[in-house]
Amino acid sequence: MIRSSLHLFILFANPAFAHDACILCSMPLMKRYEKFAADISEMIRSGVLPAGEKVPSVRVASRTYSVSPATVFKAYYLLEDKGLIQARARSGYYVREHAANALTEPELVRHSSEGTELGVSDLIFSVLGSLKNPDTVPFGSAFPSPHLYPLPSLAKSMASAVRAMTPADIVSDMTTGNSELRRQIALRYMIGGTRLPAHELVITNGAMEALNLCLQCVTEPGDLVAIEAPAFYACLQVLERLKLKAVEIPVHPRDGVDLDSLQDSLQRLPIKACWFMSSFQNPLGASMTEENKVRLYDMLEQQQIPLIEDDVYAELYYGAKAPHPIKSLDRSGLVMHCSSFSKTLAPGYRVGWVAGGRFTEQIDRLKLMTTISPSVPAQAAIADYLKHGGYDRHLRKLRIRATNP
């Protein structure tokens, strides 16, 4: 028998299908979209919605279940996050293969960390050596396929920008960075809901230089820095190079940094800074909820502890809109927000930035004492590409490919 999504949806009114999910729905503190997601999750688990089946459209779900379209969207984003459904362009949401047999979410393991000296570089460099093999997929650095980047369009922007460049531009852009590029980045912050003056931005050689400079601004050798566990391997290398000690804060695979563990560590130890990925954490992919981002910021602001927010995957979100960075909450200039175009547009151009808050001037001076400036033509090329509207069109295509490989 051919079953429509609506037919399957109405079947769920039968108590035989609904019993377990209703237990979930009756749990305290469960929001409405979470209850609705629990219903759909149970339908998938029980086989009512099998692999490959289209789940009810937002309109049908909203009408049948008497919830708002916004509630349905949030529930479907949650189910996407759990790997149970996937969106298909101009088609809707479908149950993923093996969704009914999804692995149980691992429990968070809390442990006490007093500060660890690091010695990981030899191991990391030996692993990175394998990337010379073209058949190796580099999950550690998590770059999209280079075939997904708009390299011909970038080449045109490079040619146009270099032709328009004056001798004065070549010199003046070797400080905080190309002024048009900074303006375009500030504009993207504003569109995303974060008001940020362009003069707070420092253009760097990729996000890694930004992250290094931020740590150097707020720490000295021997200081304790709170990092995620597990963490991005380059974070460990930076701490090792700067002779800093790591205080490991466990990361929940769905909700991100465990704030109870962080609070305990802040009360016990003289932590000088935190380095966290609040959205799409590498390697777990976890994203903090908006509520937890607020709690984290309030916790750090109370003790005046700087936060280095590594947000290189911000533009690779799935769903209707990007998550807000913790930087959007920053009232005291404590958050140094780092990102780059390496994951989304042009890895080899090595153009990143940091919104440095109260530390902007220190970061800029440190950069001038080391690398001075990223490539001026590369900055101008990306500024031209952003200015003429190609970037958002490219990102839409990239996100669709990431969702439907």
Image: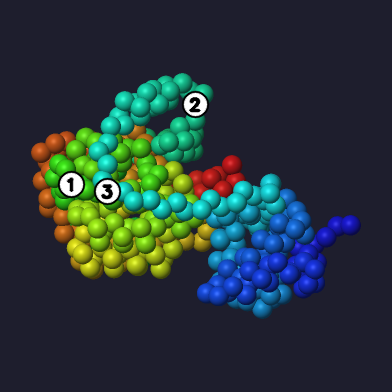
- The crowd level at tag 2 (other Cα within 10 Å; few <14, some 14-19, many 20+) is few
Q: Which quadrant would the C terminus be assigned to in this image?
A: top right
- The residue that label 2 is drawn on is 136
**Mark 3 / mark 1, whichever is N-terminal:** 3
User: Dot 1 lies on which element?
Assistant: loop
- The residue that label 3 is drawn on is 114
Task: Report, in whole angstroms, how far the alpha carbon at label 3 lies from the one at label 1.
Answer: 12 Å
Task: Report, in whole angstroms, how far the alpha carbon at label 2 lies from the one at label 3.
Answer: 36 Å
Badge 3 amino acid? Glu
Which circle, 2 or 3, is nearer the viewer?
3
Badge 1 amino acid? Asp
When the figure is inspected, residue 279 is found, relative to residue 292, above or below; the finding is above
- 91, 241: nearer the viewer: 241
User: Dot 2 lies on which element?
Assistant: loop
- Can residue 54 be seen at all in this image of the molecule? no
Mark 2 near mark 1, Cβ–Cβ under 8 Å? no
Residue under the point 27% across and 53% down: 274
- 184, 216: nearer the viewer: 216
Residue 368's x, y, as percent? 12, 41
Residue under the point 13% across and 45% down: 220
**Mark 2 / mark 1, whichever is N-terminal:** 2
Task: Report, in whole angstroms, how far the alpha carbon at label 2 lies from the one at label 1.
Answer: 37 Å
Mark 3 near mark 1, Cβ–Cβ under 8 Å? no
- Can residue 237 be seen at all in this image of the molecule? yes
Residue under the point 53% across and 45% down: 402
User: Dot 3 lies on which element?
Assistant: loop
Residue 223's tag is 1
